């Protein structure tokens, strides 16, 4: 099970991209350190009043992935560095080399080693 979470932050009082990057870097670094999660700024890189962050977890159970993403969302919200404006989550199950519930961008055979 792959769980992805998109978190949009409102950055009130931020008047430069340099200040925004400092906040984004801090949120991402803290979250990665606490949860050992894949995380990145995924949209609105040139807007200084908002940031959109993406977080991805992999688990063998949807409930576990949901719980981790919920904890990540709550952690980001409680950092106090920015206000969470919107959160969206999506889950994709990998079965027999095919993704279900999301877009299939490649087949597992695309990643097999050449013999």
Image (cartoon, grey):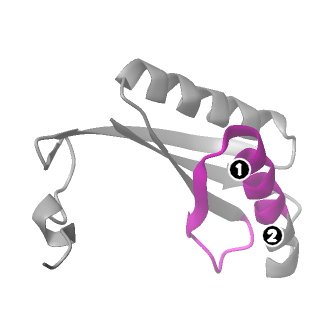
Q: Nearer the viewer, residue 42 or 55?
A: 55
Q: Nearer the viewer, residue 13 or 35?
A: 35
Q: Nearer the viewer, residue 108 or 74?
A: 108
Image quarter in which the N terminus is found: top left
Residue 90 locus on image (x, y percent): 36, 40
What label sits on residue 109 in the rendered view? none
Residue 66 locus on image (x, y percent): 47, 26
Q: CA distance from mark 1 to mark 2?
A: 18 Å
Q: Residue furthest front?
A: 115
Tag 1, which secondary structure? helix
Indicate the quadrant where residue 109 lies: bottom left
At horizontal 18% and vertical 68% (from top left) the residue drawn is 112
For label 2, the residue is 20
Which stretch is magenta?
23-49
At horizontal 73% and vertical 66% (from top left) the residue drawn is 49
**39 drawn magenta:** yes
Q: Closer to us: mark 1 or mark 2?
A: 1
Tag 2, which secondary structure? helix
**51 drawn magenta:** no
At horizontal 87% and vertical 41% (from top left) the residue drawn is 80
- In the image, residue 17 sits, relative to residue 2, either above or below, namely below
Would residue 113 be visible to someone looking at this image? yes
Residue 30 locus on image (x, y percent): 81, 49
For label 1, the residue is 32
Would residue 107 be visible to someone looking at this image? no
């Amino acid at each position: 099970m792959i769980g992805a979470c998109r978190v949009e932050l409102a950055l009130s009082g931020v008047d430069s991209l340099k200040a925004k990057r400092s906040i984004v870097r801090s949120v991402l670094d803290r979250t990665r350190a606490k949860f050992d999660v894949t995380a990145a700024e995924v949209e609105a890189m040139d807007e200084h009043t908002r940031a959109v962050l993406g977080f991805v977890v992999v688990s063998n159970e949807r409930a576990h992935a949901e719980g981790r993403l919920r904890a990540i969302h709550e952690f980001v919200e409680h950092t106090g560095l920015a206000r969470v404006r919107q959160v969206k989550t999506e889950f994709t199950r990998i079965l027999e080399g095919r993704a279900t519930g999301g877009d299939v961008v490649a087949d597992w055979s695309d990643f097999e080693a050449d013999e």
